Image: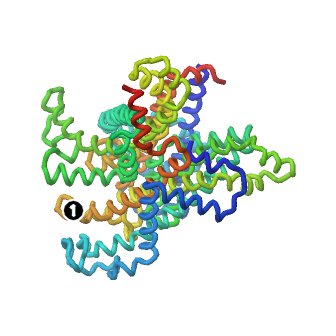
Amino acid sequence: MRFVLRRAGFFLLTLWAAVTLNFFLPRMMPGNPAIAMMAKFHGRLTGQSLIALETIFGVNTHESLLAQYWHYLCDIATGNFGTSLFFFPSPVSQVVRSALFWTLGLVGLTTIVAFLLGTGVGIVAAWRRGGLLDGIAPPVLVITSAIPYFWIGMMFIMIFGLKLRWLPWSGGTDITAVPGWNPAYIGNVLEHAILPGMALLITTIGTWTLTMRNNMVTILAEDYVRMARAKGLPARRIMLDYAARNAILPNLTGFAMSLGFVVGGAILIEYVFNYPGVGYMLLQAVQNEDYPLMQALFLLITVAVLVAILLADIATAIFDPRTRTAR
Amino acid sequence: MAATTVTTQPGRASAGHAARRFWRAVRRNRKATAGAVLLVLFCLIALFPGVLAHDDPTAQIYPRNLGPSAAHLFGTSGLGNDLFAQAVWGTRQVLIIALGAGLAATTIAAVIGVTAAYLGGTWDGALNLLTDVLLVIPLFPLLIVIAAYVQNSGTLVLIAVLTLTGWSYTARQLRSQALTLRSRDFLEAARVRGERPLYIIVVEILPTMISLLLAAFLTNALYAVLFASSLQYIGLGDPNATSWGTMLYWAQNNEALQAGYYLQAIVPGACIALLGAAFALLNYAFDEIGNPALRPVRKIRSKHVQSATS
């Protein structure tokens, strides 16, 4: 319990750090981009959205920095992220909600599949040391982990979308599709998710497999594994209950840590495939210089990653009794 | 954790001896050899791009979107640049970013990680918390947000941003290695001699961690390459710079894939992937050299293991 409480405290601290970054970054920029930005937007923006922009850069205000900061914290706490400049006059929180659905579906599902599949391959590769899988998987996965995410996506579009014409490669559904809980629409959504999902899977699976394999290799040399063998326990039981269960613990922590990278990759994948999720929206916000939307999306992504990390921590606490008793 | 056999020996082997041992280890490991050859090749290209490519990479003087030919090995871009010249000259900027951000991030990681481990107590707690917070804030979205405020900055700013955001992962690794060194006799001796902490960290601890520092550098360089290219690809780099990421940005803008000009997207992406693979292969090989348990096993032993499983 103490472990989980400590991790929850860390969660809050990191959240505060992210919010503070969001507040101070635009104010710290050299050469005062705010003035340039205001000049650029002059005439195009009026009323509310001008105020929104002024609030972000902290110009034309009589409040002290500290008071602005306090106001910002209060706004975030009450879920007030300001008004989107591009989707004016919708509030940011409303614009974001539609995108969240797509990203959670695509990235959430792909990440879970990648974790399970990667961990599984890692277990088997380490168990059959020197076997075919162990010979092929590590070098191939080392190389795929070094390929830029978006380029895999581009190559998928080229091969499966444009050359072979197997699958759709742009958007979350067909433009003509009518949303609804019917097989035709759901099938359409799934069809559009295959290519971006596969691209994300290929680039992220390597990390899981390699860490799991290397953990397993180290654990298989432990005395308690030898003991289990000496007792004549079934091979499957040694592999899963003795070796894998212990080897997976660092991988759970690794899961938490590399989630940030997965999210980064997902942003690019969504961009390449015009997938209407949070990442695509973030890049659109950047291109449209829609700063309130950009800030809100950055916070949203950070919160999502932090929640996932907290869940991984709780899972660690369940799987690893040591964390429950330690300190 | 990687690199145990070589690093934890506090003995002062001569630099020449260490280098020779290192070179032998690289040559024996096939992954390391492949990575090293690729990296040396890219360095040579970056140093002497004019030898390979005679065209000016910035000159937009050719017919647009040409296919490959003897005059234009990879064809031309949507703006009329020679793609081969762009790919060759682009090597330089990517390598500068990889070296610059890799070295700077590793330096910060070493100072923070080792200082935390050596000083312990409150310092360790504070520095460790800073590292952890930065580690879990998603890096790429943060980079996007910073780049959006900075607006089309030059190479130096890009290196600075990549450094400041990217050091935390390796700092954590270096800290845990330094923790294992803390109670060693040679450090105790230095403390008894009355050396200052700074001296002990720089002169006594860091040299024993050379191979881990090298692995940290490779990790940081790889991420610098991938993140820099990604930022350039989505249009947050300098659109006039000659670099692989910028080439991809123009290919995307030109809708090169949809129009069938595949080489405009394949060439720069393959270059990034090859350079990334060089760093990744070297890094993985370092793990194997440092931790003998991970090395590929010979057939005899695998039979033995399999007979145990069946």
Q: Position of residue B124 (x, y in %)?
A: 69, 40
Image quadrant containing the N terminus of chain B: top right
Counting from the top left corner in percent of width and height, residue A105 is at: 30, 34
Q: Amino acid at mark 1?
A: Tyr
| Residue lying farthest to the front in this orientation | B300
| Residue B149 x, y percent position in the rendering | 47, 56
Q: On the image, which quarter does residue A308 sit in?
A: top left
Q: Residue furthest right?
A: B193
Q: Secondary structure at mark 1?
A: loop
Which residue is the site of mark 1? B262
Q: Is residue A119 visible in this depiction of the protein? A: no
* Colour scheme: rainbow
Q: Is residue A20 above or below residue A323?
A: below
Left or right of B24 in this view: B297: left
Classify the position of the C terminus of chain B by image quarter: top left
Residue under the point 78% across and 48% down: B186
Q: Residue at x 40, y 49 (%)?
A: A142
Residue B261 visible in the displayed image: yes
Number of marks in picture: 1
Badge 1, how many Cα within 10 Å: few under 14, some, many 20+?
some
Question: Which residue is depicted at the point 75% across and 43% down?
Answer: B184
Judged left or right of residue A301, residue B266 is left
Taking the image as shown, residue A151 lies to the left or right of residue A253, namely left
Rendered image quadrant of residue B62: bottom left
Please state the chain letter of the residue tagged with numbered disc 1 in the rendered image. B
Q: Is residue B270 left or right of residue B99?
A: left
Between residue B151 and residue B219, name the one nearer to us: B219
Give how far across and how far down residue A316 sits, in percent: 51, 26
Q: Nearer the viewer, residue A289 or A138?
A: A138
Does A207 sit above or below residue B147? above
